[in-house]
Image (cartoon, rainbow, N blue to C red):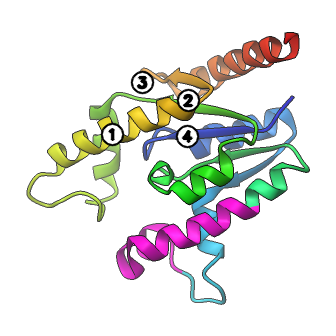
Amino acid sequence: MTSVQLLGMKHTGKSTLGRLLAQKREMDFADLDLLLEAEQGPPPLLNSREIFRSLGRIRFQELEALAAKKVAQRMKHSLLVLAWGGGTIDNPEAVEALRDQGVLVHLVEAPKVLFDRILRGGLPAFLSADRPWEDFQKLYERRTAALSAICDVEFSLEGRPIDQAFQDLLNVLEDVERRNHAR
């Protein structure tokens, strides 16, 4: 068994699947967004969306990189399931810290499905008010290509219910670990 990192666009289910996977495998779970929130210092703390909006992209990525380095050190000594933030792929320092720790699984979902899920929480700061769908499509294409380039496994969700996606993910990980063990 090895550490597993779940990567993907916002609202692909990284945290939900990660918690289920950690529970099933009796491993610790960490969410990079929550870890970066903890890097702010003493309360009052902002959530990751508020950090991005209030403090800006540069400070957000500094906190994310710091959190990534700490969790990468932790992963060198213990098994962990880690859910990346939706935009972590745009943070070279965080990617560099994490990329060699365990199996990297790219969770892929259809852009329209993700866009609809994102908008349920309100228009995020990374999308413009006048062209949100066009902005999202460009972001999706760029991030998906970058995630595909660094991942060990691509796992297409195809709108499956979470319980089915989880079972299928378990099967994929077992296959990957069998192949890696055979080497």
Q: Which of pointers 4 and 1 indicates the residue nearer the eye?
A: 1
Lower position in the chain sequence, tag 4 or tag 3 = 4
110 with respect to 165 (left or right): left
Q: Which residue is mark 2?
A: 162
Q: Are marks 3 and 1 in contact (CB under 8 Å)?
A: no
Distance from disc 2 to disc 1, alpha carbons, whole Å, reads 26 Å
Q: Which mark is residue 40?
A: none
How far from the left and from the top, in percent, is residue 69? 70, 62
User: What's under tag 3, amino acid-wise?
Assistant: Gly
Q: Are marks 2 and 4 in contact (CB under 8 Å)?
A: no
Q: Residues within 10 Å of mark 1 (few under 14, many from 20)?
A: few
Q: Which residue is mark 4?
A: 7
Q: Is residue 134 above or below residue 109?
A: below
Lower position in the chain sequence, tag 2 or tag 4 = 4
Q: Which residue is mark 3?
A: 159
Residue 100 magenta-drawn?
Answer: no
Characterize the magenta stretch by its predominant secondary structure: helix
Q: Residue at x 41, y 29 (%)?
A: 109
Span colored in magenta: 46-70
Q: Residue at x 42, y 20 (%)?
A: 158
Q: Nearer the viewer, residue 14 or 92?
A: 92
Q: Which of pointers 2 and 4 indicates the residue nearer the eye?
A: 4
